[in-house]
Image (tube, rainbow, N blue to C red):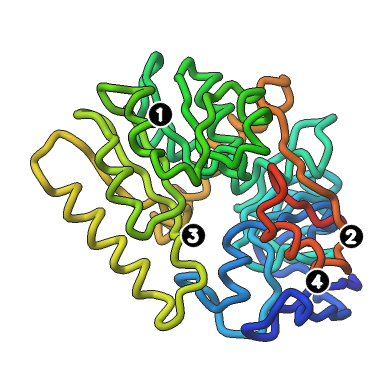
Amino acid sequence: MHATEIVLPGIVEPAGLRVRDRELPAPGAGQALVRVEASGVSFAEQQMRRGKYYDQPKFPFVPGYDLVGRVERVGPGVDGALAGTRVAAVTKIGGWATAALVDAGDLVPVPDGVDPAAAETVVVNGVTAWQMLHRMARVPRGGTILVLGANGGVGSTLVQLARHAGIRVVGTASPRHHAAVRALGAEPIDYQDPQLPAKARALAPDGYDGVFDHVGGPGILESWRLVRRGGALVSYGSAATRDVAGNPRLPVLTLFGRLLWWNLAPNGRRAGFYNLWAGRRRRAAFQARLREDLTNVFALLAAGSLTAQVAARVPLREAAEAVRLAESGTVAGKVVLIP
């Protein structure tokens, strides 16, 4: 099948992305050929173009952390009934294309009637939010959490999943996004307010059952201080060090060390870094867990209990503009590429 792909050739500005056309081989054993209907621009790709994503492949490569599409053909060993079905997959790379070869074990069915772009917004964002909330932090019904970046792709999904689970949410965002954050059911705080830690504490004097921090950097200490006894700090990024020069792994390793130290301290609180790919070596168990969690998220989306936060739909060939928009800080939700 002919495929158009967006290639990241090296450390470049968005305009440096390249468009490539090529013929894809037939799917091999255990593979499926998927005609892509939607892929997204996440923080991972923003880091990859800077050469700062922790374990990204060598340049050049096709970005695209996740995708939604229809199965065109399957390879040997794959159930032929999969052909023609709409599916989603977390791919890490390769999603920014009109077609992609995917391990059939990584495919998750998308419910009938769900718009591909809407489904795309909750693939990696939905799995990330679900697993952080329910598998890592294990926040109980009636608890209170703090979500940094509550207007973002993961943040807005996390707010909705928490509210559906009967959890109170306080979320940080710029003032222009406060109305949207309130509409999702969270209590907003200006993320640039110098009194943010004090205001967050005032809204939960006994501390938070869960604090979800994608910012990292020095501010992670304030997040830790806001966690109540029995609660958890879940870190899932280091946006504060996005533009820091030098070894891209150093800020992340520093963050890992700090979280490990806190987690080992006998203070009744937990701290950890969320890694979607943890347990990947036990491939079957990893795929089953991801399939279960994403199926739960899709069920909420199909039922209307979760609203897709589509910030913009941008043609695949205009990926450079999509990246600029996603990095602008002016949008709420996820920028979606449409082949």
Per the image, label 3 sits on a secondary structure element best described as helix
Q: Are marks 4 and 1 in contact (CB under 8 Å)?
A: no
Can you tell which quarter of the image residue 333 is in?
top right
In front of the other: label 1 or label 2?
1
Look at 34% across and 23% down and name the residue there: 204
Type of amino acid at the residue the image marks with label 4:
Ala
- Label 4 to label 1, Cα distance in Å? 47 Å
Per the image, label 1 sits on a secondary structure element best described as strand
Residue 6: x percent and y percent? 79, 73
Q: Are marks 1 and 2 in contact (CB under 8 Å)?
A: no
| 4 on left or right of 141 | right
Marks 4 and 2, the one that precedes in the sequence: 4
| 277 on left or right of 319 | left
Rendered-image quadrant of the N terminus? bottom right
What residue is disc 1 on? 145
Can you tell which quarter of the image residue 102 is in?
bottom right
What residue is disc 4 on? 26
Residue 242: x percent and y percent? 50, 67
Type of amino acid at the residue the image marks with label 3:
Ala
Rendered-image quadrant of the C terminus? bottom right
Q: Which mark is residue 315?
A: 2
Marks 1 and 2, the one that precedes in the sequence: 1
Residue 62: x percent and y percent? 70, 74
In this rendering, is residue 318 above or below 180? Answer: below
